[in-house]
Image (spheres, helix red, strand yellow):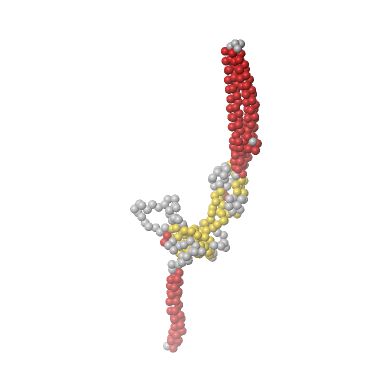
Amino acid sequence: MAEQGTAERKRSPVRLIAMLIVPALVIGIGAYWYITSGRYVSTDNAYVQQDIVEISPEVGGRIVAVLVEENEQVEAGDILFRIDPEPYRIAVQQAEADISDARLALSQAETAVSTSGVDISTAQANVEFARRNLARERELMERGFNTRARVESFENQLSDARARLNAARAAQMDARAAVGSAGSRSARSEFPAVAAAIARREEAQLNLERTVVRAPVSGTISEVDRLQIGQMASPGTAVVSIVARNETWIEANFKETDLDRMRVGQPARITFDAYPDLVVPGRVGSIGAGTGAEFSILPPQNATGNWVKVTQRVPVRIEIEGTPARQMITGLSADVRVDIRDDGER
C-alpha cells in the first residue's frame, strides 16, 4: 500500500502539468485565432507573371542565320536572326536608278523652260514682222496698188504668228509647271518624281535594315524551335519569344468576398511552391477591373433559368518588393497573404 501511494504521488505532478498544458494550448490557439482573425486574406490561386514579347519580322523572306538558343539571355539590341537581304538590296539599287531617271526628267524639264523662252522671242519677232507686212500691204491697197485678197493673205499670216506666240507661251507655262518648286538647284529634291523616287529608296533601305531582327527588350529566349534556317518568315507572324526581365509581379486571384477591405498599398507575404523556404515581401499594386469570368473567351450566361451562384475571382496585382533570392520563372505557382488591417497608405 505504501508503494502504491508513493507511485500515485509521483504521477500527480505529471498529471497536473498535462492538465495545465492542454488548456494553455487551447487558450493560446484561441487567442492567436482571435488576434489574427480578420487580419489576413490569402489565396493559393496566384502565379508569377512576366512580360512575354512575341518577336515577328517586319519584312518577309527566307531565314539565313539564327544567332540565339533556347533559354539564352539576351540584351536589348542583340541580333536574334537574319532574313535573306538580297531582294531588299536589289530594291535599293532599283530605287537609286529611279532617282537617276527622275533627275534626268527634271533636267529635261528645266531645258524645256529655257528653250521655251527662245521660242517665245522668235514668235514675238514673227508677229512683229507679220504686223509690219500687213500694214504695208494695207497702205498699198489704199493707194490702189494692191488687191483685197493679198491683204487678207497677210492678215492670215499675222493670225498664224500670234497663234504660234500663244502656243510658245503655253508651252513655257507647262514646262515651268513640270519643274514646279524645283526651279532652283537647292530644291531639286522637291521635284515630284525625284521626291517619290527618294521615298522609295528610303523605304527600300529601311526594309533592308529590317532583315536584321534584334531583341527589343532584355530577357530570356523562349520557343526558339519555331525559328529555323531556311524557314520562310512572314511579317507579323511570331517566330520566337522573349520573357522580359524588366519586371516581375504576382497575379493573385482573390475571392470577391475578400475584396471588401483590400486596398492598394497593403503589404503582402508571398511564398512559392517551387521554393518552399523562400518568403518574399510584396504589396498590393492594383485590383482588377473585372472578374476572370468576364474576361474569358466565353463569358458565362446566367439568364438561362438554371442559375447556380458561384463565388467569382478577381485578379489582384501584387508587386514584389526587393530582389528575390531565387529566379522568378513566369507561371510559377504562389501563395499570397495580404494584411488587410493595414490601410495601404504609403
Task: Point out residue 271 in the picture as x, y percentages from the top left corner.
Answer: 51, 63
Q: Residue furthest top?
A: 144
Compared across the picture, whether 134 is left or right of 296 comes to right
Q: Nearer the viewer, residue 220 or 124?
A: 124
Task: Point out residue 184 in the picture as x, y percentages from the top left corner.
Answer: 64, 36
Task: Point out residue 228 in the picture as x, y percentages from the top left corner.
Answer: 58, 46
Q: Is the residue 315 above or below the residue 105 in the image? A: below
Compared across the picture, whether 26 is left or right of 59 comes to left
Tag count in the figure?
0
Q: Nearer the viewer, residue 31 or 175?
A: 175
At 43% across and 58% down in the image, what residue appears?
Answer: 313
Quarter placement of the N terminus: bottom left
Asked whether residue 278 appears in the rendered view, the answer is: yes
Q: Residue furthest front?
A: 143
Q: Nearer the viewer, residue 198 or 158?
A: 158
Asked whether residue 211 appears in the rendered view, the answer is: no
Q: Is the residue 201 above or below the residue 168 in the image? A: below
Q: Nearer the viewer, residue 244 or 141?
A: 141
Q: Residue furthest left?
A: 305
Compared across the picture, whether 159 is left or right of 1 comes to right
Q: Is the residue 150 above or below the residue 209 in the image? A: above
At 43% across and 79% down in the image, what residue appears?
Answer: 19
Task: Point out residue 266 in the picture as x, y percentages from the top left corner.
Answer: 49, 64
Residue 112 occupies quadrant: top right
At 44% across and 84% down in the image, what residue appears?
Answer: 8
At 50% across and 60% down in the image, what residue appears?
Answer: 285
